[in-house]
Amino acid sequence: MSDTPASVLADDIQKTKDQITQLGRQIFRISSSYAELSPEQLREFGDLLPTHKLMANEAVIYAQMAEFYKASVAYIELLHSINEKVVESAGIARPSHKGWKP
């Protein structure tokens, strides 16, 4: 495999997309696990307040969550933009058929 700057960048983009795919699958598993919790199990989250990193800094937790997820969306959008530019640089034209959305 070539290690030209273009090849390295293409490899990095693909590796990052693969990682995001794995992350998406993990998020769906977490969602399913959460949906299966009983009311008693849900109340156990209160026990985590003093000790778990996820519950740290209660006074600003909602602001921190908003900032984290806002940044995460921005990262995905940036990757999308770079991926599009790389594909366009390769000479692959954007489809012109109806129904396709970026």
Image (cartoon, grey):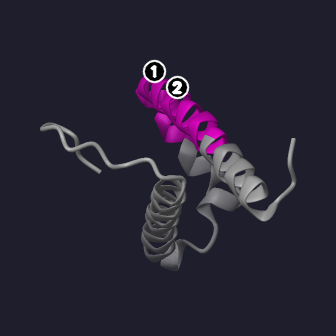
Q: Is the N terminus in the top left, top right, bottom left or bottom right quadrant?
A: top right
Residue nearer the viewer, 14 or 71: 14
Identify the residue shown where x is 12% and y is 38%: 98
Residue 33: percent from left, percent from top: 52, 25
CB contact under 8 Å: marks 2 and 1: yes
Q: Which mark is residue 6?
A: none
Please give the name of the residue rendered at 44% of the width and 47% of the height, measured from the top-left corner: 92
Query: Which amino acid type corresponds to the residue marked 1 in the rendered image?
Result: Glu
Q: Is residue 65 above or below residue 23?
A: below
For the record, the magenta segment spans 18-44
Q: Residue furthest left?
A: 98
Residue occupying image coordinates x 55% and y 58%:
86
Q: Position of residue 25 (x, y in %)?
A: 55, 30
Please tell me which residue is depicted at 55% across the width and 50% down the height of the picture: 46
Q: Look at the image and say whether residue 49 sits in the magenta stretch.
A: no
| Residue 31 in the image: above or below residue 90 | above
Which residue matches tag 2? 33
Q: Main secondary structure of the magenta part?
A: helix
Q: Secondary structure at mark 2?
A: helix
